[in-house]
Amino acid sequence: MRAYRYHRIDVFTDRPFGGNPLAVFPTANRLSKEEMQMLAREMNLSETTFVLPPTNKEAVARVRIFTIDRELPLAGHPVVGTAFAMAQNGMLTVQEGRNQFVFELGAGLVPVEIDVKDGAVQSVFMTQQPPKTGAQITDVRVLAAALTLDPSAFDLGSMTARVVDTGIPWLLIPVRDIRALSQVRADFKACSELAKTVGTDLFHAFTLDTGDPDCAVRTRHVWWGTVTPGEDPVTGSAIGCIAAHLVTEGVLLAAPEAIVQIEQGHEVGRPGKVTARIGTSNGKVKRVQVGGSAVHVGNGEVWMPDA
């Protein structure tokens, strides 16, 4: 039998049992892709990560990210949480102040910044790719059917519903207020048809109406039975897309940088907060960073049969 230890990390929160939970397997040598998928299914979390030696000399580690049913090329809270776990457990050598590393992901090389104060990790930021835009939805009836909302609940007058990709594509859907966000109930059939239209099954709703005065945006993962075992509490990859999208649309101003606090997770009882840093040049978004704090909540061990 082969023993594999894992860490449980709550990401985008400063207290246990908030934010987005993550399982990190810090030494995943000898695990096949099929075994990683089985372990991710066993963990039954939004994502589980597996740390391997890098194949690129610029990277300190290769990180593979799995949901319960697929491998992802990039995701926000898994990268932030994995970097936090590695720094906290001595797998990365960090010093006081800002520490910079590079992770190797399916999407390519991803820079990571780890801020340390008084010997403790305060925050982790990951850099996503500059945004690429995809399909746009202008028919509010299509969105209303998919999210089971009245057409009046959407805010397409001032913001666009479209696919944005900073490493993984999300359909971003603006709604009017927190009340509309709380009432989102995905319709499987309508969402399936919408996914075919836009080319992604990852949907995220957002509003500029927030509960925290320090936050500019509140978001929610629109879960309809794909990717995760339930609604993702706090979604770093989607939040990077949303912040970049709002700067591109002129809703948020960046001259040359916007620093935005974004909240998510309240509807599922796991509130979290993400900081997005969006850098621009000549009116275009050139840099997307998302990050925040994390908490180490426990460890475990899984035994795998010998191959």
Image (spheres, helix red, strand yellow):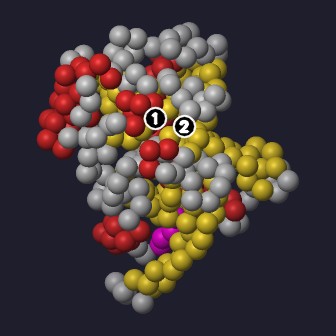
Q: Are marks 2 and 1 in contact (CB under 8 Å)?
A: yes
Q: Earlier in the sequence, mark 2 or mark 1?
A: 1
Task: Answer yes or no: is residue 166 visible.
Answer: no
Image: 79 above or below 299: above
Q: Secondary structure at mark 2?
A: strand
Find residue 229 and report its image quarter: bottom left
All told, the count of numbered labels is: 2
Question: Viewer-proximal residue, 100 or 138?
Answer: 138
- Distance from the alpha carbon under mark 2 to that under mark 1: 6 Å
Q: Is residue 268 magenta?
A: no
| Residue name at image x 47 percent, y 61 percent | 49
Foreground residue, 16 or 249?
Answer: 16
Q: Main secondary structure of the magenta part?
A: loop
Hey, which residue is sitting farthest right in the picture?
Answer: 118
Position of residue 180 in the picture relative to residue 58 (left or right): left
Residue 88 percent location from the top left of the image = 69, 62
Packing grade of label 2 (10 A; few <14, some 14-19, many >=20) is: many
Q: Which residue is mark 1?
A: 219
Specify whether 108 is left or right of 95: left
Write the residue at 50% across / 40% down: 264
Which x, y percent locates residue 152?
29, 19
Q: Where is residue 243 drawn, in percent x and y?
A: 51, 27
Give the residue number, with chain letter if any, for mark 2: 263
Q: In the rendered structure, which amino acid carries the disc numbered 1?
A: Thr
With 37 as the anchor, is 249 left or right in this view? right
Q: Is residue 307 left or right of residue 141?
A: right
Quadrant of the image containing the C terminus: bottom left
Q: Which residues are magenta?
A: 24-29
Q: Quadrant of residue 159?
A: top left
